């Protein structure tokens, strides 16, 4: 989303789904996992919209959809690429929108070669290190600065971690153009060529979706898009948790751009976050490579000084052109009076990153002795992460582990009751890890803002005081920091200067000395001279006169009022709901909404009227706050040398992009290609039907470790492994249980509703493997064997793929060893092959075996796994 449009958040909001003429839900079981938001899907259906659900399983979402499309897990790019082929070859794209608002007309370098030219890879691929040199992806006659995060790959390759953070800088804002779209190297023609083989027949062969059903979906989507009608996409972790997960979302972005569905009511792409505040944890990040507001984390070797950092990370055009204002205001929030122009705003006091410190890399670092201690807040890798055995045995190498949670989760008790204790792989007496289990306050016991799936900040008031020793996360972080600052107050070590200089002076309140969450939000929102509250991020300055802890949240305390706590009744505001809470940025519900009007500033249609130019008033107006310079007329043309937003014309709605356009083609910013390409999952039963020499993503990230054996040789699904692991498994979430189960498996009523770990299998698979409903089954990969109760159901059916039937085993991932309801963890089966851009695990598809009966206990379980590995021809 960040690469395609400029920001990494949902382009639309849940209430707007009611205006859609068609909604495609893919990579999500929205009715079960987001039941409150799903009401707006039902509202759209009652208004006549067509609801399409694409999912391997028939779920509660499928039951309420007009069309359910079973699909082979891991084949979504082939399906979505088929829709792109259908749109282009049948001339169903919204031409005026595409020509004006996308980079379709931009001409690409003559050095660029497509996967269609090079048997499954793009130009610049270096097989020796599994990366791309992206220089040939640039526009004709231009060098696209590889500055995502200011980091240059040591081998000249792309960096994808920070796309949407700092933007991708162009040497000049306007690449060479062919508005006729006839030039053979313009983006549109490259797109046509790239997807020319993604035919309905290919979709059927790869995805198991019959040709007629695919065409019904494609026709429905196209008929409900264009000038008078709009369609929306909704996705969740069913798309992100793949080794090509970023490219899944990119494919949807291409479809929505071609159909003119971005920035318009009833359109857009809704990224469904699992719960509050997952969106907030990326906005004010728990990610190792970002600072608040998606500002890139400085790298240890990439910058000479502060000026060099700003130059490499701030675009000259678009709103990232104000990077210096965003960054300096953040440093003032961090370091207060110590952050001055003379000190380079304390730039040298910021920590540096020196490589990949994402979750699975630092977990591997526990084995290597590089990571000695681990703070675990609101996370349970023993259950929720891929290859739980790897995670548990890694924590057994730590010196210390701090766990803060409501209950004793599996990550806190691994030393005594992990499955590896039973097999003898770990012995409690030999584990050196000192575990500190600290009770956390629940959401009802703390105040503060949550940021939900549509970028909406909503204030939550504490209902009761925390009981006993329970404390809020804010209390823990503040007082830990306070104590550390006190201990280092007199230190002369230069390494401690960053902590000594921190402005760490939040007021506390109540009997527990809880820091004021309201004061924290004030600092995040920001103020100017005299502590006057700021109204919007456009007021931030690069001279040190403004403070803001997160520039995209600037204005959330505008006028001295906690905007996130607003609760205006529905009857007293418009359907957009801009007086309920506060949405970043600048309280805009829909991003890029300038695109809801044509180049002249008039609505594309009265039916889809949203934001438009009021010539009499000389400003943009409408039902939402315009995501555009408010007084920039449609005929505005920038002067030579103009910077930031002033360098964008009045017809360029994607204001965070250097060229102001949606990107159908990505000249830089992704590690694995400028256009999405179908690759097989890391573990698969098939070779790539489109590119037989390239089975899986050639630049996927692999965390190599002896505890992560693979079901078949890399990129080689051999007949031997297919016989040993002949089925596909996928994971999913239940309404009754939440993520790793810490909040729900200890709750009696929820356990009554979903009392036991189970697996879903089709009647055909049950007959083939001798599985009986409600009996036990053992599911096996090269990494683990788990047991589950059998649910035989027609909700999960075999698919005809490549001339053979493919059976899918469905596994909810909530269970572990602790709680009122216990069971094996589905994620123990999964491997550590990750998306190259986000480092997220591919936990939605593997190959497996399933057999009747319970799994072995003790060391005999290891014997079972060894036998499977030998027969498959693989080893640790």
Image (cartoon, helix red, strand yellow):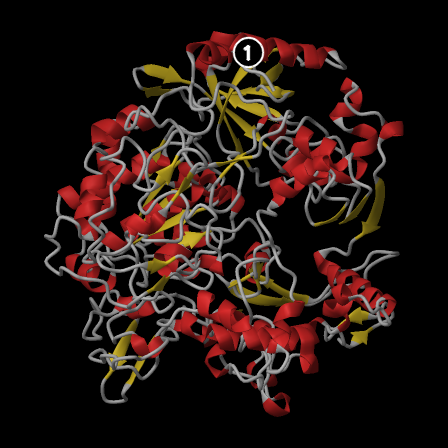
Depth order, front residue of 674/490: 490
Q: Which of the 4 image quadrants contains residue 392?
A: top right
Q: Residue at x 62, y 59 (%)?
A: 352
Q: Residue at x 77, y 28 (%)?
A: 418
Q: Which of the 4 image quadrants contains residue 18?
A: bottom left
Please state, as top left, top right, bottom left or bottom right, where the N terminus lies in the image: bottom left
Image position of 42 with respect to 471: above or below: above
In x, y percent, where is residue 442?
Answer: 74, 55
Q: Which of the 4 image quadrants contains residue 771?
A: top right
In x, y percent, where is residue 808?
Answer: 46, 22
Residue 738 visible in the displayed image: no
Residue occupied by mark 1:
771
Q: Is residue 589 left or right of residue 553?
A: left
Depth order, front residue of 748/331: 331
In x, y percent, where is residue 838?
Answer: 50, 47
Residue 152 visible in the displayed image: yes
In x, y percent, where is residue 338?
Answer: 69, 80
Q: Residue at x 73, y 31 (%)?
A: 393
Image position of 803 with respect to 674: above or below: above
Image position of 194 with respect to 211: above or below: below
């Amino acid at each position: 989303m960040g690469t395609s449009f400029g920001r990494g958040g949902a382009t639309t909001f849940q209430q707007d789904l009611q205006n859609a003429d068609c909604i495609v839900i893919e990579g999500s079981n929205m009715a079960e996992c987001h039941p409150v938001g799903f009401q707006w899907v039902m509202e759209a259906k009652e208004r006549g919209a067509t609801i399409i659900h694409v999912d391997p399983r028939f779920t509660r979402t499928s039951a309420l959809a007009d069309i359910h499309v079973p699909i082979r897990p891991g084949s979504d790019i082939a399906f979505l690429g088929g829709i792109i082929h259908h749109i282009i070859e049948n001339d169903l794209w919204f031409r005026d929108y595409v020509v004006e608002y996308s980079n379709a007309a931009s001409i690409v370098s003559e050095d660029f070669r497509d996967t269609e030219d090079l048997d499954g890879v793009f130009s610049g691929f270096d097989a020796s290190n599994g990366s791309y040199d992206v220089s040939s992806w640039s526009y004709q006659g231009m060098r696209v600065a590889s500055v995502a995060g200011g980091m240059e790959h040591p081998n000249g390759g792309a960096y994808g971690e920070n796309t949407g953070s700092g933007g991708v800088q162009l040497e000049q804002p306007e690449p060479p153009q062919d508005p006729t779209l006839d030039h053979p190297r313009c983006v549109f023609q490259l797109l046509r060529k790239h997807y020319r083989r993604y035919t309905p027949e290919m979709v059927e062969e790869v995805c198991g979706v019959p040709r007629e059903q695919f065409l019904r979906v494609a026709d429905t989507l196209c008929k409900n898009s264009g000038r008078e009608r709009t369609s929306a996409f909704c996705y969740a972790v069913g798309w992100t948790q793949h080794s090509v997960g970023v490219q899944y979302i990119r494919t949807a972005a291409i479809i929505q751009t071609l159909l003119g569905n971005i920035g318009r009511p009833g359109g857009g792409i809704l990224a469904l976050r699992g719960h509050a505040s997952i969106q907030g944890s990326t906005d004010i990040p728990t990610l190792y490579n970002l600072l608040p507001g998606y500002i890139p984390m400085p790298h240890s070797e990439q910058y000479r000084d502060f000026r060099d950092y700003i130059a490499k990370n701030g675009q000259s055009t678009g709103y990232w052109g104000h990077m210096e204002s965003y960054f300096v205001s953040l440093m003032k929030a961090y370091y207060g009076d110590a952050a001055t122009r003379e000190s380079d705003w304390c730039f040298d006091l910021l920590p540096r990153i020196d490589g990949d410190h994402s979750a699975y890399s630092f977990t591997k670092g526990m084995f290597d002795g590089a990571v000695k201690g681990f703070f675990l807040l609101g996370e349970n890798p023993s259950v929720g992460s891929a290859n739980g055995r790897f995670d548990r045995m890694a924590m057994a190498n730590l010196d210390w582990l701090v766990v803060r949670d409501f209950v004793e989760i599996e990550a806190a008790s691994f030393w005594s009751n992990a499955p590896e204790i039973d097999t003898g792989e770990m012995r409690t007496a030999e584990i050196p890890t000192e575990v500190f289990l600290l009770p956390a306050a629940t959401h009802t016991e703390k105040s503060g803002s949550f940021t939900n799936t549509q970028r909406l900040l909503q204030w939550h008031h504490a209902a009761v005081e925390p009981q006993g020793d329970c404390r809020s996360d804010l209390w823990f972080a503040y007082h830990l920091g306070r104590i550390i600052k006190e201990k280092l107050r007199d230190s002369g070590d230069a390494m401690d200067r960053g902590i000594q200089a921190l402005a760490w002076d939040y007021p506390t309140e109540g009997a527990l000395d809880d820091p004021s969450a309201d004061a924290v939000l004030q600092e995040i929102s920001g103020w100017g001279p005299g502590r006057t509250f700021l109204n919007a991020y456009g007021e931030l300055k690069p001279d040190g006169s403004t403070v803001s802890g997160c520039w995209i949240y600037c204005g959330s305390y505008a006028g001295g009022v906690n905007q996130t706590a607003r609760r205006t009744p529905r009857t007293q505001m418009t359907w957009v709901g801009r007086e309920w809470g506060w949405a970043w940025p600048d309280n805009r519900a829909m991003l890029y909404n300038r695109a809801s009007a044509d180049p002249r500033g008039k609505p594309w249609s009265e039916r889809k009227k949203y934001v438009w130019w009021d010539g009499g008033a000389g400003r943009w107006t409408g039902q939402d706050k315009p995501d555009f310079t408010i007084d920039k007329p449609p005929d505005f043309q920038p002067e030579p040398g103009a910077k930031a937003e002033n360098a964008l014309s009045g017809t360029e709605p994607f204001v965070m992009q250097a060229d102001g356009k949606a990107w159908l083609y990505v000249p830089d910013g992704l590690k694995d290609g400028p256009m999405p390409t179908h690759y097989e999952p890391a573990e698969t039963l098939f070779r790539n039907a489109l590119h037989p020499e390239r089975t899986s993503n050639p630049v996927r990230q692999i965390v190599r470790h002896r505890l992560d054996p693979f079901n078949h040789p890399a990129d080689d699904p051999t007949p031997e492994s297919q016989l040993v692991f002949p089925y596909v498994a996928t994971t999913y979430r239940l309404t009754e249980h939440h993520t790793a189960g810490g909040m729900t498996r200890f709750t009696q009523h929820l356990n009554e509703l979903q009392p036991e770990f189970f697996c879903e299998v089709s009647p055909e698979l049950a007959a083939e493997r001798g599985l009986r409903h409600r009996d036990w089954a053992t599911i096996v990969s090269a990494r683990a064997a788990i047991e589950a109760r059998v649910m035989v159901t027609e909700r999960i059916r075999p698919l005809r793929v490549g001339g053979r039937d493919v059976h899918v085993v469905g596994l909810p991932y909530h269970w572990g060893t602790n709680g009122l309801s216990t069971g094996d963890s589905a994620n123990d089966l999964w491997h550590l092959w990750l998306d190259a851009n986000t480092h997220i695990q591919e936990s939605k598809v593997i190959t497996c075996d399933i057999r009747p009966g319970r799994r072995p206990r003790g060391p005999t379980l290891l014997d079972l796994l060894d036998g499977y590995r030998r027969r498959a021809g693989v080893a640790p």
